[in-house]
Image (tube, coloured by chain):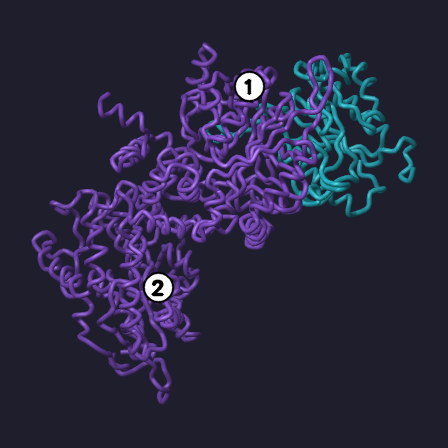
Amino acid sequence: MDKEETREKKGKGCSPLDLRQAIRQALANQNLGGALGRFADAYLPSREKVFEGRDFAALREEIRRVKQSTIDYMDALAERFTENARKRGAVVFPAPDAQAACAYILELARKNSVDFVVKSKSMASEEIHLNKYLEKAGITVAETDLGEWIIQLCGQKPSHMVMPAIHLTRQEVAEIFSHEIKERLESDIPRLVKVAREQLRQKFLTAQMGISGANVAVAETGTLFIMTNEGNARLVTTLPPIHVVIVGLEKLVEKLSDAGPIFEALPRCATAQHLTSYLSLITGPAQVENIEGETGAKELHIVLLDNGRRKMAADPRFRDALRCIRCASCLNVCPVFALIGGHVFGHIYTGGIGTILTAFFGPGREAEDLQTLCLGCQRCREYCPAGIDIPQMILDLRERYAGGRLLPRGQKLFMEKVMPNRKLFHTILKTAARVQKPVTKGRPLVRHLPLFGRGLTEGRSLPALADRALRDRLGAGETAAGQIGGQTIRPAGEPVQKAGFFAGCLIDFVYPEIGEAVLDTLVCLGYAPVFPPAQNCCGFPLEHSGFREAAVELAKQNIAAFAGAGVSVVVTACPTCAVSLKKSYPRLLGDDPAWAKQAADLAAKVVDYASFALHQLADRQIEGTPFGPVTYHDSCHLKRSLGVYREPRELLVRAGAQLQEMAWSDRCCGFGGSYSIQFPELSRPILEQKIANIAASGARMVAMDCPGCLLQIRGGLDYRDLPVKAEHTASIIGDILKRKFS
Amino acid sequence: MANTALDSKAESNYRLFARMAEAMAAEVHRAGNLSAAREKLREILQALAPRKIVAAPGVLLARLAPGEAAQEAGAAFYTEKLRRYAPEADLGVSEMELGIAETGSIAQNATDAASRLVSTLPPVHLAVLRTDTIVPTLRDAITRAGEGGGPPPYWTIITGPSRTADIERVLTIGVHGPYRLIILAIDNADENGNPNG
């Protein structure tokens, strides 16, 4: 067996190399990219339409509450469900794992001389690899969901939880069906669907057993809810005399009415439908009729599947993932999923939630690689109808795998050992600023980096490190208020307050001019800015790469740096730093009695630049000369983690900008910190979409509030020689204020 | 053919129901009373020209005398051995327990195999229901399903015809279930036409 074959046998995800290769293949597949891209564009507007007049936040809260008791009382609900379903005549088999579930179903089939089974879509059955198990024992299994049948015929796996065959074109489906029915078929979709109807109809009519999943299992009544669009589940549960339902423990709810919010959200989130064509409630065996017209009760078997769910429920960091109702919203809004699909970004369960579920229900090694694919843009959290913090759980997975196998050793070492040592870290940065000169030739943007990976400068230019870091420009200590022309907006006589400035690495070492603009702003607003030189990296990149301990060390350094500064507020012009200081520190240090209070104190003082400036200006006018059409890019952390998107726009408009919104202003730019270094091949196409949207807006300037986005977007614009300027809001506002007050 | 016998709540439920059902590609007809409904049924059968019809028994349906209408249309009409006849029938007829306004759905207790055979296997499903059974929301319908000691063994909610978007996300109507769903809503379904009778 040669090497290639071994890899083939093991499937993807066996080595970092395989994941890279899979990404390359997916990116090269234009059908896939086209289908997923079109869907990503169409999904949100359609979804918005079916949610019209509904309070999504309230619905989400209701689902959260229902599913939280599923998690809290899983065992009790399982017991009640079992008791009530049995009372109604069902046979309930509690399956601790995949093996037990498969064995039970095989035994049942054998006892009833079943050799042909029809199945309607069930992720749980995919999870336990039931088809393979039954087929090995000589039982034929036919998938009947159109998408599932297509991929069964060509021996693939689902690429999406709701649309399993989204990666295949009509031509490919025609090819697959032609092979199956041994007749040349045109690639006409209605005709192909008709072929599926005819082929599968015979299977429904002759199968001796039907197997389905379920969307909800109600403990108080023993009821199972099953929803489909095609009608296959109704046939699977109506025609064969035996019906087997495989349902995971996380599908349990207490009361019948608990299903209400779930089915209000599920079809709207999954396929932007008010309701699917069919929703059936099965409570005990219904009637079945044979060909002679004789009727009797069906046999109903319910396999209640654990297979890692109880373990997940017991894990405080991951238990909330059991709230998932499998709507695939998180896949549908994920910029990375839209590029590579579920064959790469997923195992059985796909995308962000799939990564987490795979870590518990599937092989752990798969999840270890999958977690690296998350860009951290937080978009999925915004749309999850169960309020699951998927990005945070992916971080927790990352910590569990200490960065994963894909992170180069050098980078690991740098993050774990060098960055927490501020002096060493900063010395290295300053040395790099000096030795880069032959490469940058004094230019601020570098298009090619010799020796380094070419991926870094493919599709974007990189900024050079600044000649002098912000910390060196400032000298140590405080800058007096009123230094600029002596004039501020603060009325004379009012005491001057101190405002801390947290720069973050990018502003300190790459964009010191943004830092100066922030300091100018603070002065003009009547504050005495304080820049404690002991401040270090905020720690976010470390936490994001799975190095919690190193992140904790940095948190402590920064808390200490600001502790004695006597500031009433800490302003930062980097949303990622803001999220780190405001949200991560209290979480990282919450259990540490020596630091918890200090972390909370600092967190309470931290504010992003735009919110601070707008609030301080209150109703004062600042308009400069009108400066034409400006479009605004929403940074992921600013909009989704801090909820700030109105403030910078209002600031810009008041400063004289004519705001011209781009399409999808809050889609990620693809930077994601070290992500763009780890996966330049994924970061680049996401940046390309962003650049295209900026260009299409017609604006001559794109403003944003994140130095990371600025690095990415400015680099992308320069690489394409587009006549659009990219600026940090602070640079624009700081400049105007400085001119006004000096 | 609006009927003043319906109160304004029921009337607005029906309007939303019809709009949503049509948006989901169902065809909706309305009849003020039984004789109008019989006439409507005849029209529908004339237009469909089915060769074989299967029907699930029901109180409301019996009042429409679908067998007679089938005979007039020249179709064979089966109400028994449906497992044998439904796969080759051109039309399945059944009655529904209630409608859902916000989703344009119809729902029934489908415990009897007959009710499912006629609504899943033939290419066209004709469903009759009383206009005044339409409830406002899906949640109302789920509550109704559980009334009287828990849900029956099989309870079904149907919204439009069978559909798929599994190939290139192109919506295609009619996969495993019916291609067409025709709904006939009857305002006053009492034998003597008296709203109180």
From the viewer's side, name the closer residue of B131 and A680.
A680
Residue at the spot of label 1: A110
Query: How far from the left and from the top, in percent, is residue A21?
Result: 27, 33
- Chain ID, cyan in image: B
A174 with respect to B141 (left or right): left
* CA–CA distance in space, label 1 to label 2: 61 Å
Q: Which chain does the residue under circle 2 lie in?
A: A
Query: How far from the left and from the top, in percent, is residue A333?
Result: 43, 44
Q: Depth-wise, is mark 1 or mark 2 nearer the camera?
A: 1
Query: How far from the left and from the top, in percent, is residue A479?
Result: 24, 79
Confirm whether circles 1 and 2 share one chain. Answer: yes
Could you tell me if residue A606 is visible in this image? no
Residue B192 higher or lower than A155, as above or below:
below
Residue at image x 21%, y 43%? Answer: A455
Kindly state the secondary structure of the residue where label 1 is placed.
helix
Residue at the spot of label 2: A578
The C terminus of chain A lies in quadrant:
bottom left
- Chain ID, purple in image: A
Kindly state the secondary structure of the residue where label 2 is placed.
helix
Q: Amino acid at mark 2?
A: Ala
Residue at image x 29%, y 78%? Answer: A565
The N terminus of chain A lies in quadrant:
top left
Residue B3 higher or lower than A571, as above or below:
above
